[in-house]
Image: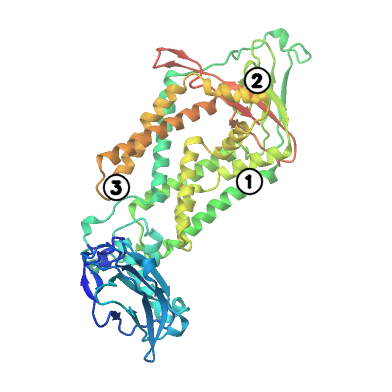
Amino acid sequence: GNPSDACGVNSELTERGNHGEFRALENRNALVFTGVYFRKAATSGLNVEHGGRVEFYLKMGPIASDNAVCKASFEDVILEYNVADQWVEFGNYPAWKFRSDSFQFVSEDIPVEGWTNSTRFRFRQPSFDPLRDHWAIDDVRIFSRYRPDWDESEEYRKRRENQNSIVKLAQCCYNSDQCTIFDKVNTNFDEKKCNALPGFDKNERNLRLKSSELFIFFSFLSAISKVLYHRVSQIFTRRVIHQKEAPLPGSFLNENSDMFPRRAFYSISEVSWQAFVVGILLGSFGGAMYQLVKSLSIVECFDHREITAASCQLNSSFVITWLCAIVFDLRSISMLTSGVFFVKREPVEILVDVHPDKGLMKVGPKTIALAEVLDIYLRSPFFLGFLSFCYILGGFPWALGSLTLPSFESHPSMQVYTQVMGLLTLLRELLGPGLFAKAFFTTQWILVTRPEDRDEFGRAFLRRGLLQQFIAGSCLTPIILASTIMSRKVGFVSSGETFGIFALCVVFGGVFGYLIGVLRGLPCDGFCLITGWPTRNCYNVVCNDRVKCPCLFTCTYCGEIHSRRMVLV
């Protein structure tokens, strides 16, 4: 055979040529067979003792005019292997099947009898007419399999560990997301070793936050934004209570008067339940903190009150993120224990006053005008138990856990779990520690079947102020998300990609603001007092929490954009 393009070349993209860059080079010639005496091509001895296969592209001359360069073929081509100087056929390719204008792909498994460490292969046309029967092969590849236990050998283990250490060193030198602070501690990372990497440039080091740290940063921005928003909104808004707190006339202060009774009730405070809740929340927080301190070898960082750089890999960004995570988790635990489970010995006072000048219900720190109460009904112990579980779940150390989770055994899905926990941290800062309880109430309304409840769900989409919330979300989200994403870019980002990121943030922020406005029109925001074991029925009170504000879009006072419906359990 001779390298030539007389019969054309294979146009299919294969792993041809420069495999180091994994790109197909230009294919100019195939191996064409037009000989007069012999038409064959053989390889040298190859090691295929554990099996393999032969792949190639074959073309036989098509039937054409006598002036064609690639003459028509009418004789078959065979593929053989050689063992102990014996050629054995294991592939036959008839002319009628491969006679065409293009190359056809062929793949043949090597027979077990040909599995040796020096097997030769040969392409041959046994009989042919010297004036025709032209054929060509292109892109021939012979694959040899590893032995079955190749990944259990000591040599492979050593090579794998060595290669992984080199890759991990490069990841840590460039501070990539694949190298966590725990990897630096476990490998005793030393920046001086980075100079041994080919082409390493210290100026190209990635100084961005890791994905787990980025969610904590977003949570910090969310917390600051919420504080500023509430401070500013309090200047322009005022809470509406139809009846004012006024002293009762003397005739009504008589304890024996039943005309306008004033009743006081007290919740059941069970110390065992409160201890159980505090134990779960603080126990999970303490476990996450212990694992983090242990994995970072923080105790070993201090030797005679001096920090040893060899064992301590802490950096300022991680320390700040760590402190923020501690604050976020402890703040959520504090809000739940004091505002939901009321971890204190004295019971919660529930005061109901039906006097016309007052008409209010006071439950702990919450005061509700009786005119705003829409519905009161009983719930089962199962409902109360699941609601308690949702609140306890909201108090778990999601922020600290997102930083601690990478310290466990590395797994491809570990990064996904870390990002999920970071996302829960961000949502908890946006929606409060009752995140899962709100999700529970929201799911109930999405799955309602009663016609009146479905009507109520539909009316929530017609509230005034939803357009304003959509616009506010569309304006604020790109400022935070788009700017952070663009600051983390590692390469060139085209103007089209930049616009796509910005547009995605606008749509996401607008939809998020719109949905928050819709949910404020449904009793999905709970104010719950669960001071005892969830083994009893509980009261469910649905009420309005009205707020008036000067609407910036209409220059008038609006009553729905900041108002909401609440459920008191």
Q: Which mark is residue 277?
A: 1
Q: Residues within 10 Å of mark 3 (few under 14, many from 20)?
A: few
Image spot of residue 559 (x, y percent): 50, 16
Q: Which of the marked residues, 1 or 3, is nearer the chain's N terminus?
A: 1
Image spot of residue 518 (x, y percent): 52, 26
Q: Quick one: SS at disc 2? A: strand
Q: Nearer the viewer, mark 1 or mark 2?
A: 2
Q: Which mark is residue 489?
A: 3
Q: Residues within 10 Å of mark 2 (few under 14, many from 20)?
A: few
Labels 1 & 3 near each other (Cβ < 8 A)? no
Q: Which residue is mark 2?
A: 374
Q: Quadrant of the C terminus?
A: top right
Seen in the picture, residue 50 relative to 361 is either above or below; the reply is below
At a point 72% along the width and 10% down the height, the residue shown is 252
**54 left or right of 411?**
left
Q: Quadrant of the N terminus?
A: bottom left
Give the Cα separation between the discs numbered 2 and 3: 51 Å
Labels 1 & 2 near each other (Cβ < 8 A)? no
Q: Which mark is residue 71?
A: none
Image spot of residue 143 (x, y percent): 37, 74
**In the orientation shown, which residue stands out farthest toward the bottom?**
84
At a point 39% along the width and 63% down the height, the residue shown is 183
Seen in the picture, residue 302 relative to 454 is either above or below; the reply is below
